[in-house]
Amino acid sequence: MVETAHALSALGLDVVTFNFLYTEHKRRIPDRAPLLESCYRAAIATVGREVDSARSQLFIGGKSMGGRIATHVAAADGDLPIKGLVLLGYPLHPPGRPDQRRDKHLPAIQQPMLFVQGSRDAFGTPAELEPVLAALPRKATLHVIPGGDHSFKVTRADRAERAAINADLYRTVVEWITSI
């Protein structure tokens, strides 16, 4: 996420990252959802106070669980001052458990959403995500990383190919945010 934040910042976005409390306390097991959501809300409030651009153009999101928690926060409070959500590797379900979906709250989100998903993501492939997004009351955009796994890594990618994949990802995020 830090590499992604630096790249997006270099492309002109103001980007803020934060750690959930469990990582700050060097624990491997995430906290329960209410504590994760509380931490995310605190980050939104702090960024809204401290970052000028966030007062008018705040986008939230994250990678995997961070993105999922962002969606829970947005779904629970439609009055949050956010313009959209950027979700990198959305964990639609645990690996190997497609029956344990994590999408019931998504229709409550009022802001546009960008989902960036690897085509081989064990937490939910684009094919699994497409019908979920098509059923949402608001438009959601899906950007697929061909051959990418949950971390967007492709098999046998050389350094130049990896750089091109990352550049495409960063450009997609910036263009989508700019379009909103």
Image (spheres, rainbow, N blue to C red):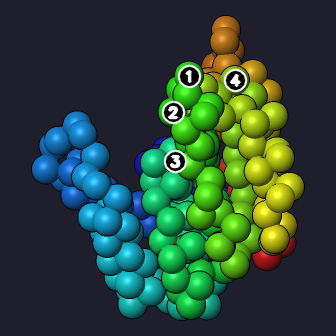
- Image point (60%, 34%), residue name: 99
Q: Disc 2 marks which residue?
A: 94
How dense is the environment of label 3, judged by Cα within 10 Å: few (below 14), some, or many (20 and up)? many
Q: Give the mark, 4 or 3, whose residue is nearer the N terminus.
A: 3
Which disc, if any, is residue 63? Answer: 3
Q: Which residue is mark 1?
A: 96
Query: Within 10 angstroms of label 2, few (less than 14), some, or many (20 or more) residues?
Result: some
> Residue 150: in sight, yes or no?
no
> Is residue 94 left or right of 10 when viewed as pictured?
left
Provide the secondary structure element on which disc 1 rests. Answer: loop
Residue plotted at (25% across, 52% down): 31
Determine whether 66 is above or below 119 in the image. below
The residue under the point 41% across, 61% down is 17
Q: CB atoms at circles 1 and 2 under 8 Å apart?
A: yes
In the image, residue 120 lies at what x, y percent?
A: 69, 23
Expressed as whole percent of the image width and height from the top left, the position of residue 111 reads 70, 76
